[in-house]
Image (cartoon, grey):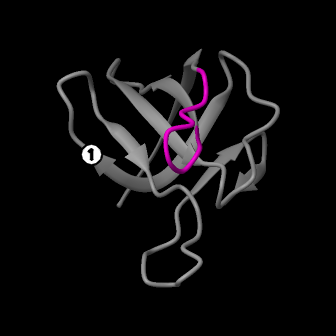
Amino acid sequence: MVKGSGHVLRLLSDDNDGSRHQRFIIELASGHTLLIAHNIDLAPRVEPLTVGDTVTFFGEYEYSEEGGTVHWTHKDPQKQHVAGYIEVNGKRFQ
């Protein structure tokens, strides 16, 4: 699991293949970018969310050549996985 923060660079369409995921790209202070894939079947949608917002996240990181993806930003209903989250404007979504 990784924790970090960045600014929303781009809002993407939801991934509706299988479990639905809200997707957006953030830019870290290092200049690297990450795709955040937030499961909206298990957690509330992050709203409101706009380009430029600061996002703090805690989730599971998967490497990719494009920069990687952070997912598991929610609670596990079966309580077998560490719970992740997204925070925006003082509100936590998990």
Which residue is painted at 53% across and 33% down in the image? 15
Q: How many callouts does the rendering have?
A: 1
The residue nearer to you, when weighing 47 against 52, is 47
Q: Residue at x 65, y 17 (%)?
A: 52
Which quarter of the rendered picture does the N terminus lie within? bottom left
Give the camera-side residue of 80 and 15: 15
At mark 1, the secondary structure is strand
> Could you tell me residue 32's position as x and y percent?
32, 22
In the picture shown, does residue 49 fall above or below 62?
above
Image location (x, y in percent) of residue 12: 57, 20
Q: Which segment is the magenta one? A: 13-21
Q: At 63% across and 30% down in the image, what residue appears?
A: 54
Mark 1 lies on residue = 62
Viewed as shown, does residue 42 lie left or right of 34? right
**Residue 37 rendering spot, x and y as whole percentages:** 49, 40
Q: Is residue 10 magenta?
A: no
Residue sticking out furthest to the front: 18
Determine whether 73 is above or below 78 in the image: above
- Where on the picture, by quarter, is residue 53? top right
Is residue 14 rendered magenta in the image? Answer: yes
Residue found 49% across the figure and 24% down from its top: 25
Name the dominant secondary structure of the magenta segment: loop
Residue 43 is situated, as x and y percent measured from the top left of the image, at 68, 57
The kind of residue on which mark 1 rests is Glu
